[in-house]
Amino acid sequence: MGTVRRRGAELETAILEATLEELAEHGYGALTFDGVAARAGTSKPVLYRRWPSRSALAFAAVRQVATSIPTPSTGSLAGDLHGVLDEMGDRMPSVLSRASLLGLLSDLTVEEATALPVLMADAVSRILQPVVEAAVARGELGPDPLGSELLAVPLDLARHDILLHGGLPRPRRDRIVDLVTVPLWRAASGAE
């Protein structure tokens, strides 16, 4: 019996997972279509049909990580925010070192760079809007809506640390949640 060829979403998932593994092991500077194809059990032409460049492939893999961060439901605003930052702080540095992330950013095409803020805004909204809605329902936040800039504060601060310092240590996560985000959101939402 012959091997079953993967197609569609199954193949794309395998390729993006292989890309993330290559990034974690070798960094962006050493990322190659040969390495990803070998790890994913496919061929270079299959990759090139989907992604025209190394930066496009890496960007797609990082986008998959960013959009797959789950929204926790711990029963408290602070607990939910800690859950989000724990996921982000644990996943992103293991996938992309600071040097790899800077290399990827410098290689992005104009189209990819233009898509980056939209990707970030969508991820912020998808991850944090349910956290805010649950906190409002529990009475932890007031009824006034938080604008997109305020909603993005915890992830913006986390991304800053990951990009500039290469990680998001526990004490920093705690300060982002307990000293910045919760008090800011409570005041801005009319809870205080």
Image (tube, rainbow, N blue to C red):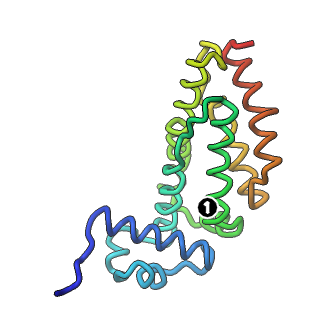
In the image, 155: left or right of 117? right
In the image, 143: left or right of 15? right
Residue at 77% across, 57% down: 164
Give the total of numbered labels: 1
Q: Quadrant of residue 173?
A: top right
The image position of residue 185, as x and y in percent, is 70, 24
Q: Residue furthest left?
A: 1
Q: Quadrant of residue 154?
A: top right
Is 120 or 24 nearer to us in this picture?
24
The N terminus appears in which quarter of the rendering? bottom left
The C terminus appears in which quarter of the rendering? top right
Query: Residue beneath label 1, please?
Result: 105
Residue at 77% across, 39% down: 176
Which amino acid is tagged 1? Leu
Residue at 45% across, 71% down: 53
The image position of residue 44, as x and y in percent, is 37, 82
Residue at 33% across, 69% down: 11
Q: Residues within 10 Å of mark 1 (few under 14, many from 20)?
A: some
Q: Quadrant of residue 80?
A: top right
The image position of residue 188, as x and y in percent, is 70, 18
Q: Secondary structure at mark 1?
A: helix
Is 156 or 114 nearer to us in this picture?
156
Q: Considering only vertical position in the picture, is 41 above or below 58?
A: below
The image position of residue 64, as x and y in percent, is 48, 57
